[in-house]
Image (cartoon, rainbow, N blue to C red):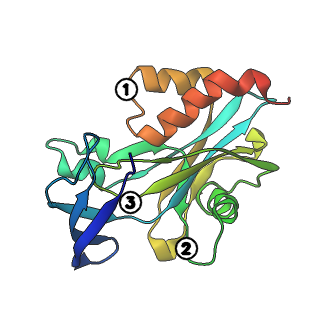
Amino acid sequence: MKKEFKVIKKETMYPGFFNLDLYQVQHTLFAGGWGDVLTRELFQRGNCVAVLLYDPDADKLVIIEQFRMGPVGQPDKQEQAWLLEIVAGAIEEGETAEEVAYRESEEEAGCTVKEMHLINEFYTSPGGTSERISLFYGRIKADEVGGIHGLDEENEDILVSTVSFDEAYAMIEEGRIESAIPMIAIQWLALNKHKLPG
């Protein structure tokens, strides 16, 4: 069976920091033929990178904390609007994912990355957003990391700290890390840190 889809109509409903597009699409069915025309909104986030900054010698990784809009839409979430995450940022036109990984590591965490390796690429929420993440592992020296970072022109206010791998994993188990990307990265590290050169 050949899988196909057709865009019948596309309209930008909201152009802003992010775009919201309204699509009419039709796609083939597993049983054969074509399905009905679907009307769907697509949040155009653009593609991004995330970087797990880790020191295998010290068994420590970088955790950042910053204000996020997502929790603002949840009731009674004042304190929870500051999320524990890993370094991440958008890929701008003309940049490669790896270039962004190095740039964001410096801007958001003040980290000089010794080596950068692609872990995987994935969609964050393919039911409604175009965002695709390139997740990297960046080798760092943990004793060089800490403080408040971010770009003033982007209104970034980012608290940077290092934690042991065990503490980071406990943050997931205790529900202190609520963002999916650091969960994926730390779980990858749990499965692979014994393979990383020390």
Q: Are marks 3 and 1 in contact (CB under 8 Å)?
A: no
Q: Nearer the viewer, mark 3 or mark 1?
A: 3
Front-lying residue, 144 or 179:
179
Q: Which residue is mark 2?
A: 92
The residue type indicated by label 1 comes to: Gly
Q: Earlier in the sequence, mark 2 or mark 1?
A: 2
Mark drawn on residue 130: 3
Q: Nearer the viewer, residue 136 or 4?
A: 4
Which badge, 3 or 2, comes first in the chain's sequence? 2
Per the image, the residue denoted by label 1 is 175
CB under 8 Å between discs 2 and 1: no
Please give the name of the residue rendered at 42% of the width and 57% of the height, measured from the top-left corner.
131
Name the spot of residue 136 as percent of width and height, x first.
65, 47
Q: CA distance from mark 2 to mark 1?
A: 32 Å
Mark 3 and mark 2 in contact? Answer it, CB < 8 Å: no
Where is residue 97 shown, x and y percent of the image?
63, 61
Which residue type does callout 2 highlight?
Answer: Glu
Q: Choose top left, top right, bottom left or bottom right for residue 95.
A: bottom right
**Position of 73 compared to 163: left or right?**
left
Mark 3, mark 2: which one is toward the viewer? 3
Which quadrant, please, contains the N terminus? Answer: top left
For mark 1, give the secondary structure.
loop
The residue at the point 67 percent across, 57 percent down is: 110
Q: Indicate the secondary structure of the residue bearing disc 2.
A: loop
